[in-house]
């Protein structure tokens, strides 16, 4: 517990630095939010009044102090292009983004880890070569290009999936709201129709979002597994006649859990950033598409809030990973 408290206290300077950077960048980008809110043809008096209401007429240091105090109270500001508090907009859109990121991460782990293990066990085989090609493609293909290609092939060309708009078909009612996650809510309520529609809509954006992470997880799993399988204790286990599946699963994979967890945690943080592009391409009603709209409207309050929240999520992911390390490897202590 002392270690957790210490780590949380160590986050404070980092968060303050992020607040300073995001605040500074939002003040130097082109565009006047007050002018955009009032309209291009609005008189200067109206613009000045809005600027005063937003606190933009105060000195920059005073604006920063006010901004930090508001964030500390949970006030993330108001998005002028929606007219609602940013925290309210985030709360409405977070379940969609979380469900997409969770599905993408599950796909990346459920495919990437077994592929990496099998490629390591069958080093220099056809499967190993194919996995390396997939890894190369996953780390080099831009996510926006992949998204457009998937839409063209699976929707426009072969009509294998529904139109990439929203989380569920228009003619189907969303499942009863319990968690806000359509897949989970439809399972909990037994709504099979909603579940089928929701999974058909989320499959393509989740596949696009997970591809890069899948490749990296597979590559890291393979490289660490190859190193472990060449160690003496693995050769000893094989010489004792232990089944190969048990050697790989129990003696090999258990000893690469720490680096695998590390790369999975890092990819979860990367999914947050890539979600902005993927949600925009697939018209997914999450935080990512909301941030894109905010950038186009020069509405910096949501962008600032998204940056700070992303950093906090990444920090807590690292904290959770540090705790998990002690679970998977008892030799690690803090």
Image (tube, rainbow, N blue to C red):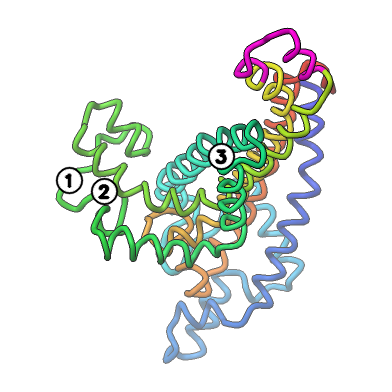
Q: Indicate the position of residue 203 as horizontal and vertical percent values.
A: 37, 47
Residue at 81% over, 17% down: 233
Residue at 69% over, 55% down: 68
- Quarter of the figure with residue 3: top right
Q: Indicate the position of residue 45 as horizontal and vertical percent values.
A: 51, 87
Q: Indicate the position of residue 54 as horizontal and vertical percent values.
A: 56, 69
The residue wearing badge 1 is: 172
> Is residue 119 positioned above or below 230 on the image?
below
Q: Earlier in the sequence, mark 1 or mark 3?
A: 3
Question: In this picture, which residue range is highlighted in magenta?
Answer: 233-247
Q: Residues within 10 Å of mark 3 (few under 14, many from 20)?
A: many
Residue at 66% over, 37% down: 123
Q: Which residue is nearer to you in this view: 90 or 146? A: 146
The residue wearing badge 3 is: 112
The residue wearing badge 2 is: 168
Residue at 75% over, 12% down: 239
Q: Earlier in the sequence, mark 2 or mark 3?
A: 3
State yes or no: discs 2 and 1 in contact (Cβ < 8 Å): yes
What secondary structure is the magenta-colored segment mainly? Answer: helix
Distance (Cα) linking label 2 and label 3: 28 Å
């Amino acid at each position: 517990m002392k270690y957790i408290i210490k780590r949380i206290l160590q986050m404070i300077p980092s968060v303050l630095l992020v607040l300073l950077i995001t605040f500074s960048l939002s003040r130097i980008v082109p565009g006047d939010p007050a002018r955009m809110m009032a309209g291009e043809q609005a008189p200067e008096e109206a613009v000045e009044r809005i600027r005063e209401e937003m606190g933009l007429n105060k000195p920059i240091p005073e604006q920063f102090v006010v901004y930090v105090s508001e964030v500390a109270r949970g006030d993330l500001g108001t998005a002028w292009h929606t007219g609602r508090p940013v925290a309210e907009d985030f709360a409405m859109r977070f379940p969609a983004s979380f469900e997409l990121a969770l599905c993408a991460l599950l796909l990346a782990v459920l495919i990437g880890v077994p592929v990496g293990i099998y490629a390591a066990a069958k080093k220099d085989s056809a499967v190993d070569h194919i996995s390396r090609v997939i890894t190369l493609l996953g780390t080099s293909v831009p996510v926006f290009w992949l998204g457009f290609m998937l839409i063209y092939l699976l929707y426009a060309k072969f009509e294998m999936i529904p139109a990439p708009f929203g989380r569920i078909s228009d003619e189907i009612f969303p499942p009863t709201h319990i968690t806000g996650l359509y897949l989970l809510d439809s399972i909990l309520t037994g709504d099979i129709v909603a579940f089928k529609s929701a999974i058909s809509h989320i499959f393509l954006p989740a596949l696009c979002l997970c591809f890069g992470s899948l490749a990296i997880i597979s590559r890291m799993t393979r490289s660490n597994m190859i190193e472990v399988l060449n160690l003496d204790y693995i050769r000893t286990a094989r010489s004792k006649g232990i089944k190969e599946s048990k050697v790989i699963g129990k003696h090999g994979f258990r000893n690469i859990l720490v680096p695998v967890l590390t790369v999975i945690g890092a990819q979860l943080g990367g999914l947050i950033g890539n979600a902005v592009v993927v949600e925009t391409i697939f018209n997914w009603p999450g935080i990512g598409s909301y941030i894109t709209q905010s950038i186009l409207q020069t509405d910096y309050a949501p962008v600032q809030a998204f940056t700070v929240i992303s950093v906090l999520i990444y920090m807590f992911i690292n904290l959770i990973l540090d705790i998990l390390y002690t679970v998977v490897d008892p030799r690690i202590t803090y």
